[in-house]
Image (spheres, rainbow, N blue to C red):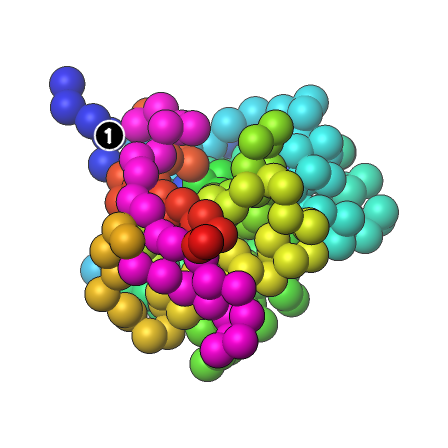
Amino acid sequence: MGPLEPELLLCIPGPWNDRSEFVRTIVSETDGEFLFAGMIMAQPGRNEHVPLDFAPHDPQMRKAFEIAGQGQLPEPLLQQLGEHRGVAYLHFPVRIINEKERVIRFTAALRRCRGLAVKIESAGIAHEWDQWFSALNSERPVDLYRSFVVLVGDSRQYYSCGMHHFGLPDVEVDRKLEIREAADLMNRFNTWQIVEEPNIASGHTFSVTADAPRYRITSTEDSRHDPSNPFHNAHGVWNLMRAR
């Protein structure tokens, strides 16, 4: 088998006791606009469908959302997530810009079916519903960026995860940078990639302002994540190193 196609993978827990109840809930709560059969959630009126996996209760779900929510999810929601009965996993093609309208429709349908919140399994970030739909409906690229990309770190570097949702490389910087400076640098670089669509090559430099420090750009592969990992970025990673 060849490498797996990258995808946008969404996790939505809910109160559904089993697959049969989930099937009935989709039909009843959407007045038949959406259906679930086999491994497909369909919207027959638009002749559209999305792969969906239904899974039983996951005892680690609350903890997973607590971490991915980065302290932003309220305690009552976390409690509900811990008490969920079933989980829907929606599979979309990876590029959110192309899929945004479908993502809105299908996740809104699961919200109507009492889905509790959404976690982007292909980036490791979670949102409550109001924030999710606010970002998806926003005209500001930075709102979409902040919803689909997370900044993390290891022992050597800070790096972003999720830029593959925009068809672009992620970015990494030296951990010696002060954390706020590192976050600002990575966020500005990534939003520059999305908004300006620059033609970047190894050896180019980047700075957040004309008089700010310059960073030399080097292209590397995403060696942190195996190609089978939904976090993997096939477009690679831009390494930013302070230019001397």
Viewer-proximal residue among 186 and 115 = 186
In the rendering, at what x and y percent does residue 100 appear?
Answer: 37, 65
Residue 164 in sight in this render? no
Residue under the point 60% across and 53% down: 182
Q: Kindly state the secondary structure of the residue where label 1 is placed.
A: loop
For badge 1, the amino acid type reads: Leu
Name of the residue lying farthest toward the front: 244
User: Is 64 on the left-hand or right-hand side of 30?
Assistant: right
Confirm whether the magenta stretch covers residue 216.
yes
In the rendering, at what x and y percent does residue 166 appear?
Answer: 34, 58
The quadrant of the picture occupied by the N terminus is top left
User: Is 36 on the left-hand or right-hand side of 11?
Assistant: left
Chief secondary structure of the magenta portion: loop
Viewer-proximal residue among 25 and 151 = 151
User: Is 199 on the left-hand or right-hand side of 218?
Assistant: left
Viewer-proximal residue among 39 and 222 = 222
Residue under the point 33% across and 74% down: 196
Name of the residue lying farthest toward the bottom: 139
User: Is 75 on the left-hand or right-hand side of 92?
Assistant: right
In the rendering, at what x and y percent does residue 68 appear?
Answer: 64, 42
Name of the residue lying farthest toward the left: 1
Q: Where is 243 relative to 12, above or below? A: below
The quadrant of the picture occupied by the C terminus is bottom left
Residue under the point 30% across and 28% down: 227
Q: Where is 78 relative to 168, above or below? A: above
Confirm whether the magenta stretch covers residue 22.
no
Residue 98 in sight in this render? yes
The residue labelled by disc 1 is 4
Which region is colored magenta? 204-227
In the rendering, at what x and y percent does residue 71 appear?
Answer: 77, 48
